[in-house]
Amino acid sequence: MALWYASPRECRLNAVALPPVGPDDCLVTTLWSGISRGTEKLVFEGRVPESEYERMRAPFQEGSFPFPVKYGYCAVGRVDSGPRDLLGSHVFCLHPHQECFVAPRAWLVPIPDNIPPRRAILAANMETALNAHWDAGSGPGDRIVIVGGGILGLLTSWLAARLPGAEVTLVDVEPSRQAVAEALGLRFAPPEAAPRDADIIFHASASAAGLAMAIASAGFEARIVELSWYGEGTVPAPLGGAFHARRLQLVSSQVGTVSPSRRARWDHARRARAAMALLADDRLDALITQEIAFQDAPTQVPAVLASSWTGLTAVLRY
């Protein structure tokens, strides 16, 4: 069985046929899969722009946008058939939510023994955060502001806080984010107390107000890295005022391509392994705030993807 987005704001469990297992393929029994809320919310609501239908295709996706579509990319499981050296090992794969699946071994990221499989569902978001720092050029001692305390904003903040001497502040409108931020060793500020004159600003709130806050927090010639993806939406950006006089840079970051600063030496596989290794911190378990039994996904996933949900990451338990 697999989870399908069947129509706007409706998902279902449908039977799927597995392809034959080739000599370099693995049959993986899924243990956990993570809901990547920002992207899957757009899919769930049918807000993927037609111009992005092909670029937005996930590996192993079935169906076509807008609906019906089998979508997702945060699966963790156990190899039950395949090359002998992988048998019984835990792996991560960019695969939709499904009870078991077949994938080439090249698509599987081994999970080290010091990382619990449940936490490993964060690997895709960690890879996005890592790529964002490469795009930003973050460095030791920088004053770094992250606007938006969802899962991507928190992981980006957590990486920033590991830079020696960096001053890192997470800004969010939700007061409950403060406890999580502090547990990760981060400073927290509501929008009215957001720092100014920052060197690097990451925007991850997917809101016009958040983008305005990110621009307002930037110092002279600072770089603002846009991590939000708005789907079919349009967002006003305050590019008047002192935007040009302060020579601000507003740049995009997207995980589909390795950042130009690393592309000559890094491929997707090396970046995926590095992101996985970064998950070896028990504090990151606090970022998973809800478990859903896979069979309950059709009734519970819509609540996770609703605008009123205040959790961080939900996982499906198989």
Image: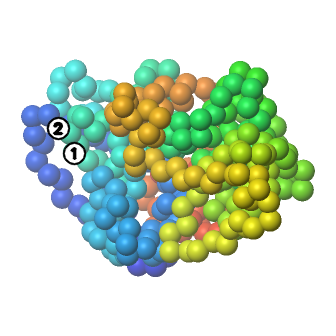
Give the tally of numbered discs: 2
Location of residue 112 (image quadrant): top left
Closer to the camera, 1 or 283? Answer: 283
Residue type at tag 2:
Asp
Closer to the camera, 81 or 63? Answer: 63
* Badge 2 element: strand
Residue type at tag 1:
Val
Location of residue 287 (image quadrant): top right
**Residue at image location 77% in from the left, 46% down from the top:** 220
Query: Residue 103, how many percent across, how many down?
Result: 23, 43
**Residue at image location 71% in from the left, 51% down from the top:** 247
Which residue matches tag 1?
102
* Badge 1 element: strand
Question: Which label sits on residue 25?
Answer: 2
Residue 155 horizontal side relative to residue 86, left or right: right
Can I make out residue 212 in this image?
Answer: yes
Q: Residues within 10 Å of mark 2 (few under 14, many from 20)?
A: some
**Residue at image location 34% in from the left, 49% down from the top:** 95
Find out whether the residues at labels 2 and 1 contact each other: C-beta distance under 8 Å. Answer: yes
Query: Residue 61, how many percent across, how many down?
Result: 29, 59
> In the rendered view, would you say 81 is above or below 241?
above
> In the rendered view, would you say 36 is above or below 208?
above
Residue 173 horizontal side relative to residue 267, left or right: right
Q: Residues within 10 Å of mark 1 (few under 14, many from 20)?
A: many
Quadrant location of the N terminus? bottom left
> In the rendered view, would you say 197 is above or below 292?
above
Closer to the camera, 223 or 304? Answer: 223
Query: Residue 127, how many percent across, how many down?
Result: 48, 39
**Residue at image location 79% in from the left, 45% down from the top:** 219
Distance (Cα) linking label 2 and label 1? 7 Å
